[in-house]
Amino acid sequence: MPPPAAWRPSTNLIDCYVTKILGEPYRKFGAWWVDVEYNSWGSTSKTRLMFRTEEAARAAKVGHHFTA
């Protein structure tokens, strides 16, 4: 019997790395957001990263790793 889904590694996620911070953190919908440019598998795109605290949002720097 396979382990529960919570115990299995996530699939279909790709590694992304921030290459540029596009603005200051801002508060919206009760969370802190930062607009960034990122690279994944040689392709550059833009997105918004969500954080629970302002300190965490300000800690996002070039090289920050996230999955998508």
Image (tube, grey):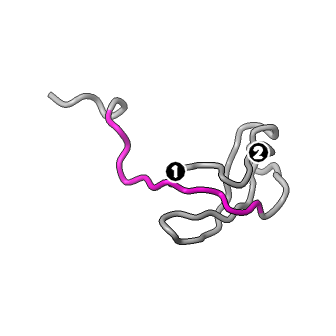
Q: CA distance from mark 1 to mark 2?
A: 16 Å
Picture coordinates of residue 24, whole percent (x, y): 85, 56
Tell me the element at label 1.
strand
Is 7 drawn above or below residue 27 in the view shown? above
Picture coordinates of residue 57, whole percent (x, y): 76, 45
The local crowd at label 2, few if under 14, some if 14 to 19, many if 20 or more residues have their Cα within 10 Å, is: many
Please provide the residue range marked out in magenta: 8-21
Tell me the element at label 2.
helix
* Residue at 62% in and 63% down: 38
Identify the residue position indicated by label 1 in the image: 67
* Residue at 60% in and 56% down: 17
Please state which amino acid type lies under the numbered disc 1.
Thr
* Residue at 48% in and 65% down: 41
Picture coordinates of residue 29, whole percent (x, y): 74, 48
The local crowd at label 1, few if under 14, some if 14 to 19, many if 20 or more residues have their Cα within 10 Å, is: few
Q: Which of marks 2 and 1 precedes in the sequence?
A: 2
Identify the residue position indicated by label 2 in the image: 57
Is 20 drawn above or below residue 65 in the view shown? below
- Out of 4 and 64, give the one closest to the viewer: 64
In reply to whether residue 24 is colored magenta, the answer given is: no
Relative horizontal placement of residue 30, taking residue 24 as reference (left or right):
left
- Out of 31 and 62, give the one closest to the viewer: 62
Picture coordinates of residue 12, whole percent (x, y): 37, 54
